[in-house]
Amino acid sequence: MIARKAAARLPSPMALTMWMTLMTLTALLNSCMPQASLPELKSRPEQKTLSIWLWQGNGMEKLIEDYSQLRPDIDVETVYVRYEDVVPKLLSSFASRSGAPDLVLLDADQIGEAEAFRGYFHNLYDFGADRNRYLDWKREQAELDEGRFLFGLPADIGPVAIAYRHDLFAEAGLPSGREEAAEALSDWETLEQWGLKLRQELDVALVDNVTSVYTASLHEYSTQPASRSGSGETDKDGRLALIRKAWDRAVRFHNLGLSAGLPSRTPDWARGAVEGRYAAVIGPSWLHGAMKTNAPATFGKWDMIRTPEGPSIMDGTFLAVPATSRYPEEAYALADWLTSPDRQLDGFLQSGNFPSTPRLYGSPELSGLQDPFFNNAPTGQIYTSAVLHYRGPAIRTEQRVRTIEGDAAVREALRRLESENADPERLWAEAEKQIAGH
């Protein structure tokens, strides 16, 4: 008997319809679900950390924050070093081959010191630095090898002006209007006479401290510079004459009772401004910027005029890239950005660091600037005018390394003159020894 296979049963039409519907739903669900395979991972660019050495009150902090927002691949680590420790710490880090920054802020005096160690710094012309971006005399302070080596990019300068209390001047019977005061201030002797009248009428000092008088005088441009040696450099006698002239003027202000003896940027200095213990601050643009944060209660009580006689300019700062930097190109890019005209304008508006970039001097953003803290004085025009009439420092950059310690000795002597009322002749004799040794 032959066995027969049972006939295969076909699904009913209803079952077939249900099956097709189920397959369709499954396909739809699968199309909505994420793929089972892992997504392709893209490697993030390595974040590079740049270390920059600054000193307190430099005014660059906000700009560095802005740069970090623009460059998330760059982490900028700010290290604050006391001004007088910058060069010694640099040399120590070079010797130990550890701890050096990628970028460092140096002023003109420190550039003069660092030139003896040029092998430890990059030549910024190798990165494409634009020599036409900055003031010639400012750029030349950081150049070697007849302009072939650039130590640092010029970050700012400090044109000096006189901020004065127009209310105290008016009360003492002095010229208090801006144009009236500027026209009447023909020389330093006129300023002395104003100080004597302030002391006589109100028992108020003219200036905050005599160091400001010394600094403004030392950095004042003279149409008859100090004697030059055959090499074209300011000789020792010329340097000594410049320092002595500034010293004598500061001592005279002290002897006449024209100084309040309050060191700049101290709590006593701020308190003295609020209490009206002095009526003028002779200083660079960044010091006037510090007045806003240190003595905001004096808003609108100040006005501003030029300095007597020739313009006076504080040399300002530079940004240099040590040769030990792990990321020299990135460090240069940061320095180039911070010293660009637009960023220098931002720095001036934020902290008073005046631009070293001539392209800005004719711009309405700078030349048309009026400051309500200083009774809407045309601060941009006053500072710009000083810069445009300035022909460069009397002491050449090559000689600064011989002047730095002597200048520091004079400043210390002036501090002692005001704090201890020490004998000025003895103080000068001590300082002169240090000047003669450099």
Image: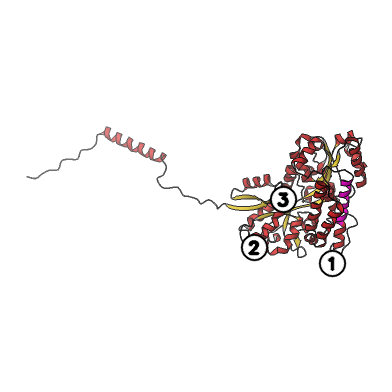
For the residues labelled 2 and 1, the Cα–Cα distance comes to 33 Å
* Foreground tag (2 vs 1): 2
**In the rendered view, does 305 fall on the left or right side of 65?**
right
Q: Is the image coloured rainbow, by chain, by secondary structure, or in one colour?
A: secondary structure
Q: Please, what is the three-letter code of the amino acid marked with disc 1?
A: Ser
Q: Position of residue 143 (x, y in %)?
A: 76, 61
Quarter of the image holding residue 262?
A: top right
Residue 33 sits above or below residue 234 on the image = above
Question: Residue 95 got which mark?
Answer: 2
* Foreground tag (3 vs 2): 2
- Name which of mark 3 and mark 1 comes first in the sequence: 1
Q: Please, what is the three-letter code of the amino acid marked with disc 3?
A: Ser
For the residues labelled 3 and 2, the Cα–Cα distance comes to 32 Å
Q: Position of residue 179 (x, y in %)?
A: 89, 39
Categorize mark 3 by other alpha carbons within 10 Å: few (<14), some (14-19), many (20+). Answer: some
* Foreground tag (3 vs 1): 1
Q: Determine the residue positioned at 27% across, 34% down.
A: 15
Q: Report the quarter where the C terminus lies.
A: bottom right
- Read off the residue under disc 1: 231
**In the rendered view, does 214 fall on the left or right side of 67?**
right
Q: Position of residue 125 (x, y in %)?
A: 71, 60
Q: Does the segment drawn in magenta span residue 250?
A: yes
Element on which disc 2 rests = helix
Categorize mark 1 by other alpha carbons within 10 Å: few (<14), some (14-19), many (20+). Answer: few
For the residues labelled 3 and 1, the Cα–Cα distance comes to 34 Å
Q: Determine the residue positioned at 92% across, 35% down.
A: 173
- Name which of mark 3 and mark 2 comes first in the sequence: 2
- Read off the residue under disc 3: 340
The segment highlighted magenta reads: 242-257
